[in-house]
Image (cartoon, rainbow, N blue to C red):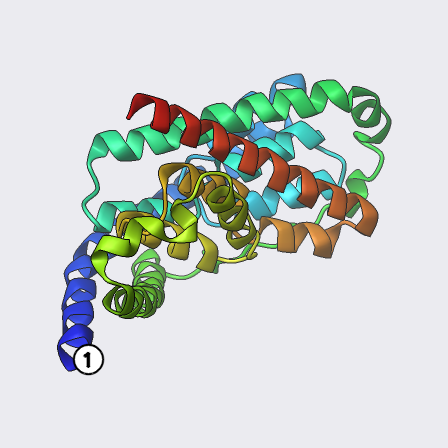
Amino acid sequence: MTDLILDCVMDTLKTLPFLFVTYLLMEYIEHRTSDRTKGMIRRAGKWGPLLGGVLGLIPQCGFSAAAASFFSGRVITLGTLLAVFLSTSDEMLPILISSQAPLGTIGRILAMKAVIGILAGFLADFVFRKYNQRKIGSNIHSICEHEHCDCEHSIVKSALRHTVSIALFILAVTLALNIIIGLIGEESLGSLILNWPVAGELLAGLIGLIPNCASSVVITTLYMEGAMSQGAMMAGLLVGSGVGLLVLFRTNRNMKENLKITAMLYVMGVAGGMAVGLLARLAG
């Protein structure tokens, strides 16, 4: 057990430089592009899902939260909101980079999230076009953005805080996973439920509903350790929207509507994950 803990600590320490540089870059991007990006989303109109799916990939803290607030104020469409939620990566990108995942793998994951988010967004706007026409602009005075990070302080201090916080979380998840692997054996790793078709995607989608960085940290770490299939990983990351859902429930008073949006996000994310999983199995 002592050796196992030491190995996990050393592996986590090795990721610190990569995490810090990544978060430092993310903080810089946030400061330089945040207002411009949110302005583009507000003016997107019928092209909202396209912009939401693409801009959601930009590593910015609070973007999904801003989209939730815009929707609550009836500034953006339902499809735009879903596109942002499905494409946003939260803590996935820093963990993939710190784990030194191949650039091709990172690019494919980001591209799949964007494509699925855009298609799902346009589908939602088509199906609920009458709803959008009735709601857009009806509650613009109530817009109130709730960011989940404090971007007013030094970007170095903010990046350092993110690095320490996520590194500790990675250490905890990795330690727990290694204990499980030690108990069941590495040869049994592929038999875990998160590697099962359908069941893996359904369970990963539930993990993705956790409204903070925990879901993306857990999902990405499990995938990198081989304890989660590609389809399950994609389902969880698609459903995971950072604190977006939390802000939606806080700013939008229609709880029935919020629950429907949550259900749509889960169904679309899991369906996207199942499609990716099926393609992966056919390719394999």
Q: Residue 144 placed where, x, y %?
A: 69, 50
Q: Residue 15 placed where, x, y %?
A: 19, 58
Q: Nearer the viewer, residue 174 or 111?
A: 174
**Viewer can see residue 27:** no
Q: Residue at x 14, y 68 (%)?
A: 10
How dense is the environment of label 1, judged by Cα within 10 Å: few (below 14), some, or many (20 and up)?
few
Q: Residue at x 22, y 33 (%)?
A: 103
Up-down: is 19 above or below 104? below
Q: Amino acid at mark 1?
A: Met
Q: Quadrant of residue 59?
A: top left
Figure quadrant of the N terminus: bottom left
Count of numbered labels shown in the rendering? 1
**Viewer can see residue 121:** yes
Q: Residue 178 placed where, x, y %?
A: 26, 66
Whether residue 38 sits left or right of residue 262 in the image: it is: left
Whether residue 145 sits left or right of residue 195 in the image: it is: right
Up-down: is 15 above or below 172? above
Q: Which residue is mark 1?
A: 1
